[in-house]
Amino acid sequence: MNPITFLFIYCFSFFCFGQNTATYDITFTSTWNAGEHSSIPSGAHWSRLVGTTHKIENTFLELGQNATTGIKNVAELGSNGAFMNEVNNSANTNTWYNEPLVPYGAVGSVTLTDVEFTLEHHLITLVSMVAPSPDWFMAVNSLDLRNSTNTAWKDSFTMDVFVYDAGTDDGVNYNSANSPNTPMPITMITGFPFNGNKIGTLTVTQKSLGTTSFTPTNKTLQLLPNPVTSGRITIKNANDFNLEYIEIYNILGAKVYATKTPNQNIFSLNVNQLQNGVYVVKLISNSTVISKKLLVK
């Protein structure tokens, strides 16, 4: 057998019969405490945990590089809109996640349930503001759920999570006054007040592995027009995708619309109730979710 034939058979077997999807629950648990982190400021809390699954490392942040506007806004303000726009405008992303930590305070936890990874989108990036702070945030950057040695999906595991300085404010204390600076690279905070200690843990629990005989593409379902300037959009189902439900989420991650879909390949949807802005439309079958950005003008 020549090498080209062998490569073809190997790739065909891997993609058709291998486990090309994996579902995990992902829990961030805060361990923010005065003993390891110098003190607990008044009103200490976390902003919402936000992030996305994606396919290329360091798409949204990178240690030693300047922060994007989205990361800057999360780190300084706990504001997620710009970061969500960066995610939605990237060709490397799959699903956007946005969840609050419970209870609202320094110590709490949040779980992203049923996070699906694919052979293409096997990385996840998550961030949350340390509040109050000048520009500090916790980050899990480009965590790969595939093993690098054999490309199998990782088993359940727990990892430490640390705090980073976005490099966009000169403040040195939790409650420092706003002090914008010339942007500096993102760095891990190894000195005061976190002293290089972890701020929490991330527990990744494998729930299921599977294969999909149908792999959605960008042409499977189309939203037309996009952006939409009137009250209706048309959904074209090009590949007989078994579309059952449609959900629309606003920039804060709140569901603003949901409907059961008719059994048609082309149908119209009234979105008059949506204000101008960016939304995520989830097109749902019994086993697959396709997320698409919708811009309403």
Image (cartoon, rainbow, N blue to C red):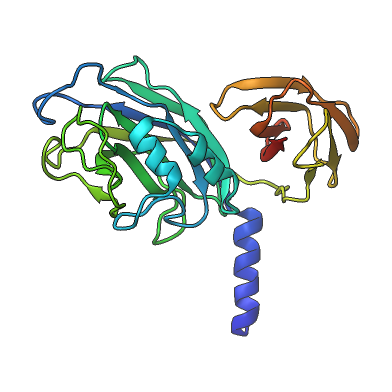
- Residue found 27% across the figure and 47% down from its top: 181
Does residue 17 sit above or below 284 in this rendering? below
Q: Is residue 155 visible?
A: no
Q: Quadrant of the C terminus?
A: top right
Along the viewing direction, whichever of 35 and 78 lies nearer the viewer: 78
| Residue 43 visible, this angle | yes
Left or right placement of residue 50 versus residue 219 in this view: left
Image quarter of residue 269: top right
Which of the 4 image quarters holds residue 180? top left
Q: Position of residue 138 (x, y in %)?
A: 30, 37
Residue nearer the viewer, 84 or 144: 84
- The structure residue drawn at horizontal position 75% and vertical position 41%, both measured from the top left corner, is 227
Residue at image coords 82%, 42%: 225
Q: Position of residue 241 (x, y in %)?
A: 80, 40
**30 lies left or right of 140:** left
Q: Report the residue that reaches farthest toward the top.
A: 103
Residue 60 at x, y = what percent? 44, 50
| Quadrant assignment for the N terminus | bottom right
Q: Is residue 104 left or right of residue 121?
A: left
Q: Quadrant for residue 200, please give it.
A: top left
Q: How many marks?
A: 0
Q: Position of residue 129 (x, y in %)?
A: 33, 32
Q: Quick one: 184 or 102, which is closer to the camera?
A: 184
